[in-house]
Structure formats: C-alpha cells, structure tokens
Image: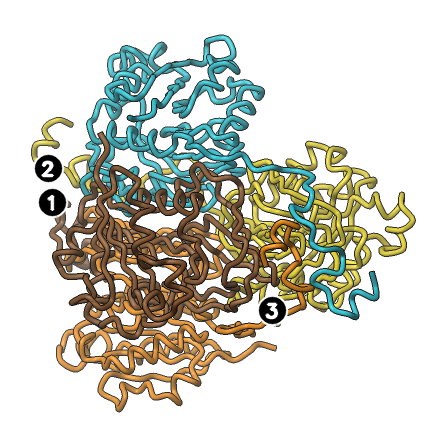
Chain colours: A brown, B orange, C cyan, D yellow
Amino acid sequence: MQRTIRVTIWNEFFHEQHKESIRKVYPEGIHGALAKMLGKNEDFVIRTATLEMPEHGLTDEVLENTDVLIWWGHRRHADVSDEVAEKVKNRVLDGMGFIPLHSGHLCKPFKLLMGTICRSKWRENDEKERIWVVEPSHPIAEGLPEYIELPAEETYGERFEVPTPDEVVFISWFAGGEVFRSGCCWKRGLGKVFYFRPGHEEYPTYYRDDISLILTNAVRWAAPRNFTRPTLGHYEALETVADKFAGRSEAERKHL
Amino acid sequence: MQRTIRVTIWNEFFHEQHKESIRKVYPEGIHGALAKMLGKNEDFVIRTATLEMPEHGLTDEVLENTDVLIWWGHRRHADVSDEVAEKVKNRVLDGMGFIPLHSGHLCKPFKLLMGTICRSKWRENDEKERIWVVEPSHPIAEGLPEYIELPAEETYGERFEVPTPDEVVFISWFAGGEVFRSGCCWKRGLGKVFYFRPGHEEYPTYYRDDISLILTNAVRWAAPRNFTRPTLGHYEALETVADKFAGRSEAERKHL
Amino acid sequence: MQRTIRVTIWNEFFHEQHKESIRKVYPEGIHGALAKMLGKNEDFVIRTATLEMPEHGLTDEVLENTDVLIWWGHRRHADVSDEVAEKVKNRVLDGMGFIPLHSGHLCKPFKLLMGTICRSKWRENDEKERIWVVEPSHPIAEGLPEYIELPAEETYGERFEVPTPDEVVFISWFAGGEVFRSGCCWKRGLGKVFYFRPGHEEYPTYYRDDISLILTNAVRWAAPRNFTRPTLGHYEALETVADKFAGRSEAERKHL
Amino acid sequence: MQRTIRVTIWNEFFHEQHKESIRKVYPEGIHGALAKMLGKNEDFVIRTATLEMPEHGLTDEVLENTDVLIWWGHRRHADVSDEVAEKVKNRVLDGMGFIPLHSGHLCKPFKLLMGTICRSKWRENDEKERIWVVEPSHPIAEGLPEYIELPAEETYGERFEVPTPDEVVFISWFAGGEVFRSGCCWKRGLGKVFYFRPGHEEYPTYYRDDISLILTNAVRWAAPRNFTRPTLGHYEALETVADKFAGRSEAERKHL
C-alpha cells in the first residue's frame, strides 16, 4: 500500500498571461502542464498555487498540507512576499520537500535555504541541451536512459553559485560551450531540496515523458519520511554519569 | 614569502563585562584572549571589534580589509543589526573566511549562510569533552594529536541542525552521553566557513595551545586565495557554434 | 505493488560453533538470527550462506540472484577466497547492495570496495553504546527515535580508516570515551554500500527491534533500482558536430 | 620558509618510443615534459621513473622519499606489477599524494584506491575541450581564469565510474556532446588523490602554462602535511570510567 504524496505546484504565472507566444506553449499555465503531468501518478494529490492568489496561494493551511512543493518563477521573484518566502523555508526545514525548477534557482525561498546568491550564466539562443546522468543509481535517475536531449533550451552555465550539492545527479552539456550541474540535491533541516534546471517558458519542456519521469522520481525522493524531530535546546544528561568524578583522573578530581 | 592574513576577531563582549566570574577568566574579553593567541603568528594582522562599537565595529572599510572573520556571540545575537549580518554574509560570499565559535552557531550571519536554524542540544554541566580528529590529513588538523581533551566544557549534542558539512574534521565526545560534529567546513560562494565548537565563556579554553593551533590552522585554511570571480548573468556564447545547425541532425535542422 | 527484494545473509559462522557462550546467544548462528529478523518483511526473500559452504555459498548463481548482501565476519576474513571476494565486489559495482556489519568492516570485499585499510580502534569492555541519528531525514533512519542505546557492546573508536562517506547517518558514543561513525553510506559503481557498526557476537544485538528496523531500512535503501548501465569504452559522437570546424574560431580552423 | 615537496613523475614511456608522431610531441617523454614544467617551482624536487626501470623505478626507497606521485599510463597498465601497484596504494594510504593524469584513470593503483572500474566513454576526434572551474575557491583552481580551453583533445564522457568525489573542481565540455568531471579530489587513508583529465599523448597539452599552474597547485594540495597517525587496533580506555557502573541506570547496574 503506497502512501499518498501531497504535491503543491507553484507558478508565478506571468509570462503565460502576458505573452501570446508563451500562452500558446502553456495555455493552462506551466502549473497546469505540470499538474497534468504529475497527476498521472495515482499516489500524488496535486494542488496548484500562483503569485496573484492571496498569500500567493501558500497559506499556512496549504503549506502544512504539502509534502512536496514545486516552484516555477522567473520575472517576478521580487513580488513574492518575504513573509511567505520565510514560511516556505521553515516548512522545508520542518520536512517538506522543495523542487525549484529552472529560473526558480533565483526565487526567495531557494536563496534563503542555500545561503548564497544562486546565480549562473545564461543566454537564450535555442541551443541543444544534453543532460547526462552522472549518478545512475540515484533514485531520481530511476528508469532514465544515460542521457536525455532537449532540442532547444535556454542555456545556463557554470559557475552555479550554490553550496556544494550533497549529490549531483545530472550535468548538462550545451551546444554553445557551457556545462551545468542540472540536477542537484541538498538536505536542509528535515527537508530535502532538488533543483532541476530545464523548463524555459518558451519551450514545451514540461510535456516530455522523460522530464515527467524525472519530476515524478524527484517528488518521491523529496517527500518527507516518518522521521523523529530531534530535541533541540536545553537537554538534561540522559543518565547519571555517576557524578562529576566519572571519567576523570585523580588529579582532575582534586580540582573539582 | 608568506602572504599576510588580515584577521578580524568579533566578540559580543557582554558576559565579560556583566559577570565577575567570567571577567576573571577573560579580563581582556574573549576577543582580547583570541587576539593575543592568534597574534603570535607573524603573518596575521589582528583587529578586534565588538557589539557596542558603531556598526558593531564591522564597517564596510573593516569588512573589505578582512580576510578572515572570527565570531564569538551568545546572549546578544538579536542585537546584531540585520544590515551588518547581511553585509557579513555578502563578504563571505565574496571570499572572506568566516569562523564562528561555540555559541556563534546561532549568530545571524552563520544562520543566513547555512539556511537552517543551526540549533543543537546543550547543557552546562562541567562535563569532560574529548575532541577526536576524524580527518587527520585535513589542513585544520595539522600538527594535532589524535584527540584533544577539555577537562570541563559546556555540552553540545546532536542533532546539530546544519546542512551536511563539506568536511567534518572533529567529532566530540561528552561525558554525559552526547556526540557533536565539532569542526565543520562549508564553502559558500567564494568564501569558506569553519565552525568550531569549544569555548564556553566560563572556561579558559581560549588560552590552550591546542585550541590555538586549531584556530591558526583554520585561519590559514579559510583565508581567500587568488581566485577568479566567475561571470554571472547574461553571457554570449564564447564561440561561433557555426550556426544553429551545429550539433543537430538533418531532421532537426529542418525545424529551425 | 511492492517489488520483492532478494536478500542474502552471509556469516562466517565460526564463533557460534566454537564457543559455548556465543552459541547460547546465537544458537542458530548470527545468520539465523538475522534471517528470522529480516524475514518478517513480506517483500524480502531471504537466503543464508556461510564460509564452509562450497564457494562460501556465494556461487555465481546466488550472487546474480541477490539484490542485497549482508555480511558478518570476524575471525576468518582471511579464509574467504580472493576469487569470491572479487566476485562480490564486482556484483556490487554492477548494482547489488552490500551491508557489512560490525567486524565485517575488515572483510575482503569491503576493503576492496573502499580502497583503504578500514581499521579502527576497538576494545571489549562491556561499555554502553549510544547511537545518535545525525541525519533524521535519511531513509535508513526512518521510524527511529533520535538515539538508540545498547547496554553493552564492543567499543569501536575513530579514526575509522575509510573514505569520507557519502552520508553519515549515525554517530556512536561509547562510555569509555570514544566516538564512531556507525552508519555510513557509499556509492560504488552502480551499487550502494551501508556499513553498520553494532553486533558483537557476545551480545544479543541482532534480536532488538530497533536494530531490525535499521537493517530493514538499509536493505530497502541499498536494493538496486531500475537503472541504465552506462556505455563505457569507445563511443562515437552522438551527432554530427558539423565537422571539425564547429565551435572553432577562424584562426583555429586554419590549423586543422 | 617553504617546505620542499619531493615529486616523482611516473610515465609508462611507451608511445613516445614507438610512434614517431608522438615522439615529436614529447621528444623527452611525457615525464620529461612534466619534469621540466614542474621543475620551475623552486620548492619542488623532481624525480622521474618509467615502466622499464627495475621495479618500474618505484623502489621502496623512492616511494618512501616521494611526497607526491604523478602517474601517466595508457597502453601498458597491465604490465605494471601487482606488487608495485599495491605498494603505491599503501604509500598513498600512508600519506603520499597521488595525481593520475588522463588515461591514468585506468592504472592499477588508482583502481585499487577507488574500488571501482574507473572507466568512461572516450573517442579520439580532435575535439575542442573547454574545462570549467566549478569551485573557484579551491586551492587547485588558484590563479586560473574561469575556464581554460584546449583546442583539440581526446574526448572523455560521463558516466565516469568512480566513487563520488569529495570535491569536483573542474567539469569539461567537449565539442562532440560530452561532459566530464575532469578534476576530482578524494581522500584515501592519510593521502590525497587528484585525478586530472587532460593530456592525450598526441597533443602538446603538457607544455601549456595553464596546465602547469593546475598541476603545480595540485602538487601543493596533495603534499602530505604534518599529521598524526591514528592508533589503530586494540585500545585501552583512556580513562577510568569509574567502573562498569558509570553511565548506567540502577536497573542496568543490577544486571552487570
């Protein structure tokens, strides 16, 4: 019997409403495309939220009932309130999985969780991207071929200014001469973070089966498990260590 | 010819002024003791700064001329201004080394850089601490025996709520039953961070030769090197990749 | 629908046959106790193998049909044939999970996979061991309290001479003053390795529910997933990179 | 006052003697070119050794007096004796730095230290290689620009079958569509290992200033420091933990 995973897909939902060419690619919004894609997994319960909703759709009630939060943002990072960004960060520290996509590497919650500026090189040049699996035994690579290829994507390039990832699952090659750590895992508090590079708004990347498989794997990997919250703060010794003399030499005892 | 390392030692300097028993241990303040200790290294140029100074003694001019910042704080973390905390974080991302000591694990700049709450268990019980070197080949362990022992220290215990360290150099054993990752390294941006656990204000920890050796090693390890700042942001392709046809099959070419 | 995991439990099965006091603790052998413990999981298919069996019970047929191999050895590491040790190593590189227990840290396959001597400090002194969870969100820690305690165990101490683990899940505290990285994860080739410290032959450690939970979690974590074997060796370019001129400046082109 | 670093450069020295076109590139052998390059550092004492010398030039005396061993091999890996390979491995575990270059990723000592097969994809196609610095603050990247470019090199491609590196300093882009973790660090025992990808025998790679800088940095990084060899094996408790009652509850005491 499989556990249910509650997935919230957040999208700033700006480009799709303000640029015709992008609306054509994602008529239901990127969140809509992702919801349809991930909704094929019977054990996922999908919800979407967007910037313009009250509290950006990320109320306490929503966050508390989210196991994994997927995040797509780009142009309007600055319009996400600091309060909501802080709440998202805290829910991750408390166990929620977090999957920023593509330009989501510059969203407030990700930057708060990483502690760095998270920038990279980029250009829009319709270049081919080939994403290599460098850790084939990682759960997020399950079922994938040894590389996948996107005929045209926005190019990102190293140096990607993030903390050294706990695990690098994918490295991208771009036709124009760049490489990028495109699939990176970090633990933060009790939560897990997976950054995944592809998904420029002008390309139909989120309709692909291979991308669907990666995101499905990532959601399962990031979903919180049945963990025990550690006690933090003041803590009595668990046992009588006899007394202060325990573990001390004669000389030391005399000085106590 | 050795390069000079400019070290700034920051101390909240509260306990030493408000509690007689602590003043007796550190009559010149913890910063004073650390300055004397580290000042024995001819290649270190030492400066100190404290909470009550204007801008907490961490003006732009001071930060720009600091290679490694050591930080001791405890009771008055909240009194450090958000602005200064943010500046310290940014200087680390730009290459400055940062060495929070002991209860400095809860200072604002460290929490900003880690992205987590950085809490742990603790108690004050005069317990013996034995610090084991688990990476003897690490530069910070250079010259040390395989463990050092503090006759009495404040106890810290896991779970230490920090991101998985890039390197764990020391693990502590406490008489009361706890363990702690006492020497942890992280890279953040272009800067290096080393957290070192010991140094409760009631004990003369910062007069010890072994602690002096560890901090000296840590300063050398954390000092910025001659690195190249990566270009970030928009970036033209470095080369003519012929044209959009390069690296594309015939079929793909037809679609461009 | 859960996948079945085929678990082979290997035991040198020496102490239990040659020392009465140990036979009393493990009348059916350590492998017998582990088989009973892990056999409670309906999705595990358990098999055991011991040193004295032909090919130590690890024929090609057995290895090819093993998803996760658990290994307990101590006194008779040297009696394991180099050929079998090499085969075990190769099966791990090809995807099999491998879980050496306790003194299994010195078995031939583990040393081959680690590339180091894998030694540590040790003593038999009936000391209390308290095992702290340092990564509560790790799958192997699922369902555990924040520490478990063994009233008496053999003591192991750092420096544990292994490569830096990919993940440290547990750190042990021992009453006599040592610490130990007691639960360590490594990837090797397509396989996963988890070393778990407890289980001295004189103590009934492998009858405990908490140990059972850890080993069950570890088996699930180490079991191979549906990965793609990377192509290795000579490899034609996947695409016509136009020709040798692609990605080259005019000056460079002239030299080709 | 700088410490002296004793560097031994090992080369199988086969291609240069058997193929005219390669002799033209490296008339004094690859070891000769490397010796000249690294010999410019006044603090390095350089020695060379080749396959055909007795014990391949790696006698006990040579190994004991080597701080860092650089290794270039390709066609004749199998002709290196198992005994010498084992000795090299053991010297690394005892503190010697080890820097396998290019096809040296398949040499016996590296495979013994890694525990994996260490293979990758490859082809000889005169492709451009662009090597990106992904950890600009790493000592091995000191003084480098953010990438270096080799106009033509042998192509290597992921999946590189090695254990997850402790640190990845460089990632290569190849014109034909591959990426490769070209600069990888591992700790093994008390020694440090740095694998560096470039250096196909047909190209004058080892005459370049940027490559010279990288190898110089790598030698300094890999050179052993003044560490303490940990005590391994049986180990008495360092202190009287009072007695067996220490750290035990009343109930537990009754059972001892």
The chain under label 3 reads B
> Residue at the spot x=40%, y=42% of the render?
A213
The amino acid type found where label 1 is placed reads Thr
Quarter of the figure with residue D161: top right
Residue designated by label 3: B237
Q: Mark 2 falls on what kind of element?
A: loop
Residue C178 in sight here: no
Query: How many badges with numbers are in the image?
Result: 3
Left or right, residue D82 beside residue D142:
right
Say which residue label 1 marks. A240
CA gap, disc 3 to disc 2? Answer: 69 Å
Are the residues flagged by discs 2 and 1 in contact, CB closer than 8 Å?
yes
Can you say which quadrant of the picture contains the C terminus of chain B? bottom right
The image position of residue A165, as x and y in percent, is 42, 55
Q: CA distance from mark 3 to mark 1?
A: 66 Å
In front here: C56 or A197? A197
Does mark 1 fall on the same chain as mark 3? no
**Outermost residue toward the right?**
D20
In this rendering, position of residue A146 left or right of residue B191: right
Residue position for label 2: D249
Tell me the quarter of the picture where residue B187 sits: bottom left
Q: Amino acid at mark 3?
A: Ala
Estimate the x, y position of residue C209 in percent, counting from the top left: 19, 27
Eyeballing the image, is C56 above or below A126? above
The residue type indicated by label 2 comes to: Ser
Secondary element under disc 1, as helix, strand or loop, is: loop
Q: Residues within 10 Å of mark 1 (few under 14, many from 20)?
A: some
